[in-house]
Image (spheres, rainbow, N blue to C red):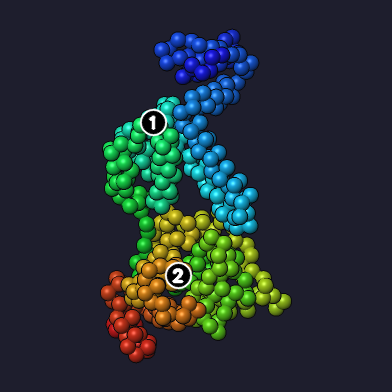
Amino acid sequence: MQSKDATKLYAVSDDGIYRLRAFREDRKKCGEFSLGLRDKRLALHIVNSIAVALDDDAPASVIGKYIDLKKNHAQICRQGKYATSSLAASTDHSISALKSRFNAHLLPFCKKRHITNIKDMFRREIIRSFMDELYATVAISETSKSIMSATLALLRWYDGKQKSSLIDGTFLEAIKNWRSFFGDKRSRPKTFLRPEQIQAILCYDYPDDQSKALFLFPLVCGLRYNEFINLRWKDLNAKDGNIQVNVAKGGKTRRAQFPKMMQDFLAKVRLSRPSNILDNDLIFKKYDRCRDLVTYKTLLKEIAGSEGKDSASNCLRRSGCDLLERHKYGFGDRQLGHTGCSRYAQRSYINEYNYDDVNSFWDEFYARCLNPDKIIGIEDIRLMAIQTNENRTVPATGTAY
């Protein structure tokens, strides 16, 4: 088969046996080869894998060369003076991320749009279609941005190998303003619980301690699901009012607030356990993500009349942060464990191990929730923060401050 002249490949059935047939740009047949297969799906898979490698300018071929260049760079790093550093490892990680992004998004888009030459990606309408499809399948804006950045880097690398520039002004303008077409995010609408819904969650009679912890740890302590299911008794520090989180996001460790209301709750949990419990034991041992998500959604609808469309911790973490931020501006980052945020940096005088302010807020709000009066709106309880900052006292009555 004269694959050098071939631009299109087809799997053709001949008495149930599939053959590979190639055509030139002028639609004339230039070769044929028997696959010896009766399975249509497998035959099409072979054709598609060969088709992208026929032309040196095919998207898969260009991506392969780009990845090979990155691999060579990683190999040089291993052999040079950076052999003992993390540069080679980080390059390997970048290669893996690039391959997954291109394979998951760029190549399927090219196949769907019948793009057989990477030069077709340099048309403004094509890149806009790619962005539109990207936002339809990838909800998180930062992930979308990283995919677009990787695609732009690939195209710039390819453009640098051409005699004349392919990246014209219209294409660069489309890339530059890629966010303006769709806004910052196109993720699913976020659910924020109102103060009276949070009051209902704090006062609800849960069927068991594990279900209660499923709500209180994210709402009050700001812990993610994977963070509180891995907590051990030794991680609780009631004396300093904080929790040592050893399995935080990104494999890091951090601390979180531990108000007295949570201390009392977990103290009762420990008293209900056998006396031979060890400090190194998990607080709760029978968490199951799928089962807990169903429990969380069922209870949330029953307690607050709201439906959480995300994971079992995001809605509660977000709502707790929103409530705290309205009363103590700049403390929402501490609620979520975002210690690197700009607002936290401006309050650098705060001891990262001292959560007294956040703990006192939740203890005072919980005391308010236990009163028979229903909390309505946010303005009614905004004065709580003002009085707390002035005299650090908790009012005796429950409706007005």
Q: Earlier in the sequence, mark 1 or mark 2?
A: 1
Q: Which residue does the numbered mark 1 point to in the structure image?
A: 163
**Residue 358, placed above or below residue 227:** below
**Quarter containing the N terminus:** top right
Left or right, 172 with reference to 339: left
Question: Where residue 186 sits: x, y (%)?
Answer: 35, 49
Residue nearer the viewer, 224 or 379:
224
How many labels were placed on the picture? 2
Left or right, 219 with reference to 227: left
Residue nearer the viewer, 6 or 73:
73
- Taking the spot 49% from the left edge, 36% from the top edge, the residue there is 63
Q: Is residue 205 visible?
A: no
Question: Where residue 3 sits: x, y (%)?
Answer: 53, 17
**Residue 300, placed above or below residue 91:** below
Residue 25, quarter of picture:
top left
Q: Secondary structure at mark 1?
A: loop
**Residue 34, placed above or below residue 94:** above
Left or right, 244 with reference to 125: right
- Taking the spot 45% from the left edge, 60% from the top edge, the residue there is 314
Residue 323, quarter of picture:
bottom left
C-alpha span from label 1 to label 2: 49 Å
Q: Which residue does the numbered mark 2 point to in the structure image?
A: 339
Tell me the crowding category of disc 1: few under 14, some 14 to 19, or many 20 or more residues within 10 angstroms, Cα based.
few
**Residue 207, placed above or below residue 10:** below
**Quarter containing the C terminus:** bottom left
Q: Is residue 23 visible?
A: yes
